[in-house]
């Protein structure tokens, strides 16, 4: 299921890897590790979300 979610981002062009299989492998590995971390510690979800949110968004919506 994690791979399926990642593929959705790739299909809509939210993440552009320019056909680089090495980057895809690293991205898959990172997604898998992040998923495992959040399953073990769901309370970390908020801090990861804050890191992923654009700075401008955080400045206008604290």
Image (cartoon, rainbow, N blue to C red):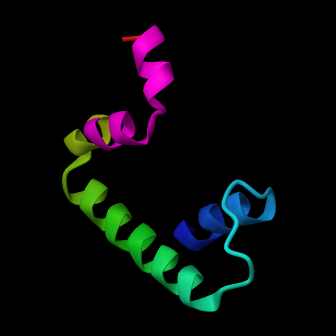
Residue 26 placement (x, y as % from top left)? 46, 81
Tell me the residue at 42%/79% (across/down): 29
Near-viewer residue (60 or 43): 60
**Is the C terminus in the top left, top right, bottom left or bottom right quadrant?**
top left
Which residue, as the protein is rendered here, is positioned at the far bottom? 21
Tell me the residue at 38%/38% (across/down): 49
Give the prevailing secondary structure in the magenta stretch.
Answer: helix
Tell me the residue at 45%/34% (across/down): 53
Residue 38 placement (x, y as % from top left)? 29, 54
**Is the N terminus in the top left, top right, bottom left or bottom right quadrant?**
bottom right
The image shows residue 48, relative to residue 35, as above or below, that is: above
- What is the quadrant of residue 37 in the picture? bottom left
Near-viewer residue (2 or 58): 58
**Number of numbered tags placed on the structure image:** 0
Q: Is residue 9 left or right of residue 52?
A: right
Near-viewer residue (60 or 48): 60
Tell me the residue at 70%/66% (across/down): 16
Q: Is residue 10 left or right of residue 60?
A: right
Magenta-drawn stretch contains 52: yes
Q: Which segment is the magenta one?
A: 47-60
Residue 41 placement (x, y as % from top left)? 19, 51
Magenta-drawn stretch contains 42: no
Q: Is residue 29 left or right of residue 18?
A: left
- What is the quadrant of residue 20 in the picture? bottom right
- What is the quadrant of residue 33 in the picture? bottom left
């Amino acid at each position: 299921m994690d791979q399926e979610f990642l593929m959705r981002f790739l299909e809509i062009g939210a993440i552009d890897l320019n056909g680089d299989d090495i980057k895809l492998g690293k991205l898959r590995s990172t997604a898998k590790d992040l998923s495992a971390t959040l399953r073990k510690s769901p309370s970390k979800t908020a801090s990861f979300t804050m890191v992923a949110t654009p700075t401008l968004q955080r400045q206008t919506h604290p």
